Amino acid sequence: MTSSKAKILVTRRLPASIEARMATLFETDVNEADTALTPDDILFGLEGKDVLVSTITDRIDAGLIARLPQSVRLIAQFGNGVDNIDLDAAWSAGLTVTNTPSVLTEDTADMATALMLALPRRLLEGTQMLLQDRAWAGWSPTSMLGHRLRGKALGIVGMGRIGTAVASRARAFGLSIHYYSRKRRPPGIETPLEATYWDDLDAMLAAVDIVTLHTPLTRDTHHILSARRLASMKPGSHLVNVSRPELLDEAALIEQLEAGHLAGAALDVFENHDGINPRLLDLAQQGRVALTAHMASATLEARIEMGETVIVNIRTFMDGHQPPHRLLPETPVPRGPQA
């Protein structure tokens, strides 16, 4: 008897409770090794499957999409970001793509806020001092002087769900809220936060003390913090990025930090195709940069909610309905035959 359950390939290990539910609901094949699969590995694992449950470590480009088995109809991304997937190619091939938005908001906002605190208060530098120098002489009036947050200006690039959550937390620390976004937020959001809207990103960058990035990665936002804009930031300011590395010109950021124009940066994401830039690691050793291991959303609660969202997307799609978190390319083109 042929099973009516959806057949899925899961490319990375997920929380045990999610894997157990998937095993109950679907015919599930999980990558037990939990390492990034090669394109050939993905294609081999997808033979006879209906759904690819992908993550950000899977490069699903046009070439791979063109070679997918015809049985595959859905790419259910475990994650909010989908810049690893060629949405245009998927759309043209008649594939549906979904993601897991919203569930990461609170955890990502917590991380961004923690890094905003860590930079001016030199938290990581103080920890390293104790770990690396056993002869620490103890407290003195001029040791490890940082800067107070209250009274500083925070500039948020992208005032969506996460940006708004960051703004709410920042107000509790006495920061004034400034933001740049494609559209101005309604008074119901602006007024409680006493937020100032800027329609000119360059002008905002020159006026604020801390900049934090929370805009999606699109064609328009790639390197939204270009070399020119990084140079135009307020001298002595700080930068936080827990979003996507492609939002800023990393090489230009390093130059501005090394030159002393920027006081510091905190990065949870970085251009690491060939390993983290050694100059960034040197700056981290100097206490000028805080580097964290892409962990802004790394809570058990978030990962379970992400998995539950993937399950909802798959079940809705397999029942013949449009999944709640379906994604479309920026400029849809005519579609090819339905898979």
Image (cartoon, rainbow, N blue to C red):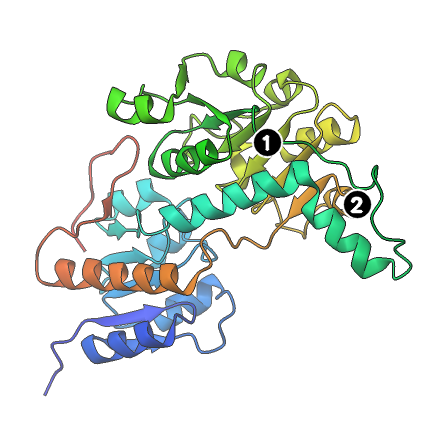
Q: Is residue 79 above or below residue 70?
A: above
- Residue appearing at x 56%, y 18% in the figure: 205
Q: Quadrant of residue 199?
A: top left
Q: Which residue is mark 1?
A: 149
Q: Which residue is mark 2?
A: 282
Q: Nearer the viewer, residue 88 or 108?
A: 108
**Residue 93 point in image, percent of width and height:** 25, 48
- Amino acid tagged 2: Asp
Q: Nearer the viewer, residue 19 or 272?
A: 19
- Residue appearing at x 45%, y 31% in the figure: 171
Q: Is residue 242 visible?
A: no
Q: Tag 1 or tag 2, which sits nearer the N-term?
A: 1
Label 1 secondary element: loop
**Residue 234 point in image, percent of width and height:** 64, 18
- Residue appearing at x 31%, y 20% in the figure: 183
In this image, 291 relative to 173: left or right?
A: right
